[in-house]
Amino acid sequence: MDLSFISAYTPMYIEAAGLTIRIALYGIAGAFGVGILCSLIKELNIPVLKQLAQIYIELSRNTPLLIQLFFLYFGLPKLGIVLSSETCAVTGLIFLGGSYMAEGFRAGIDGVPQIQRESAYSLGMTKKQTFWRIVVPQAVATSVPVFCANIIFLIKETSVFSAVALADLMYVTKDLIGLYYKTDEALFMLVVSYLVILLPISLLSSYMERRVRYAGFGNTGIVSGH
Amino acid sequence: MEGAILQTIQLTKSFDGMQPVLKEISFSINKGEVVVIVGPSGCGKSTFLRCLNRLEEIDAGEILLDGENISEAGKNIYEYREKVGMVFQSYELFPHKTVLENVTLAPVLVQKRNKRQAREEAEKLLKRIGLLEKKDMYPRQLSGGQKQRVAIVRALIMNPEILLLDEITAALDPEMVREVLQVVSELAREGMTMIIVTHEMDFAKAVADRVIFLDKGEIVEEGEPKEFFSYPKTERAKKFLNTFHYEALEI
């Protein structure tokens, strides 16, 4: 292993990692937005939009990100829409992640027992008040593990961005291998880069999952009776 | 009927076109009265309470609160529910809110009461049931009996005209049943109007002004508790009273 090569190109990896993180952040934030929007549309049972949301979810979940990116990068220009590599990458990630977030949040909403709503109704609360004050907070708490898994999944998916000529970690690695044949070093740095990004997130998410397990509000260990 | 606070006229309810669960129930309760509804599992008593709180839509008949038909279309269901409190078998406290937040949520949100005033009243009520020191805890940190007492307070703070209690001790360990029934007895003494569905026959005997025996969606027998429990008139009521211990096992 050529350590001087590794140290020489570390700044390049840091820069590429920065780009990967930036795009992942935009993509995840967008996916959150799209996901919550879709699950709200389905929850509120809005005609037409509800069917559209379902079509989007099926389309998004049943096609690979690479193909979605090809469509955005090579397909859309034929229709006169030219997007930059970065825009394509963010859009692709939102398109892919939105459906996963939607399904995760939806499961959380469905997981709140009907009688919890009835208990709020019996106090005179409206459907809207009940949804926002009673259902959503519980749904978010139970969805946290799914959200965390989705975030990690989406960050890993960024490794295909090089296909749309984005100078991300994978792109830099392929470049270095092509230029200098330093395959071992380049791949080693690639793996380390992803681990450096993902391990803290993974640890943080297990910590959060522990906190919200069983929607453990006020879980201080003092549990009496049932 | 004069003096009736809540009344039903030929209330009928069925699920998905099946045999009706409630058949033309005509019922009324006066202010300050405590009515206990007993009957075998599946007889429709819980459904009846749920209809009274309009958690279930009724198929036919009327529900009158203070003489006003509230089952008509267009009636404000939320305003009505404010006046008719309900406590559930499984407590149904909001797990993401503390005891105090559980109790003050609806008064502030629904009745637009002043936050501080609502909190003071909540604390007063919690103190009465001996749970003031638990006010900042979450429901999962409480025992079943404590949870159910909080649920009663949560309904009470809305100043309902009538309280519906749906098998509120059925999910509790025996030693916790007493602490919950104690609260209910006190409410009865203070003149709270209540409809209580229960399998606790001794409690029914002690607290009821009137007992209603419901079977297969019909009021089969109705009377004073002493009379009903000692000398039931109908065969079905006799049979039920003889076997209710087995009934209790089915919960």
Image (cartoon, helix red, strand yellow):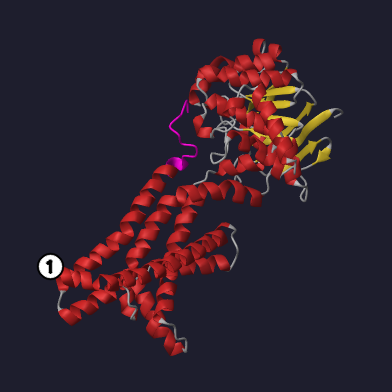
Q: Nearer the viewer, residue A165 or A21?
A: A21
Q: How many marks?
A: 1
The span shown in magenta is A213-226
Chain name for mark 1: A
Location of residue A6 (image quadrant)? bottom left
Q: Residue at (16%, 68%) from the top-left corner?
A: A3
Residue A107 is situated, as x and y percent measured from the top left of the image, at: 47, 52
Vertical relation: A215 (above or below) B1: below
- Is residue B209 rendered to the left or right of residue A81? right
Image quadrant holding the N terminus of chain A, namely bottom left
Q: Which residue is mark 1?
A: A1
Residue B179 is situated, as x and y percent measured from the top left of the image, at: 59, 19
From where the camera sits, is residue A124 visible? no
Residue B186 is situated, as x and y percent measured from the top left of the image, at: 69, 18
Residue A75 is situated, as x and y percent measured from the top left of the image, at: 40, 84
Residue type at tag 1? Met
- Find out whether residue A220 is within the magenta segment: yes
- Find out whether residue B211 is within the magenta segment: no
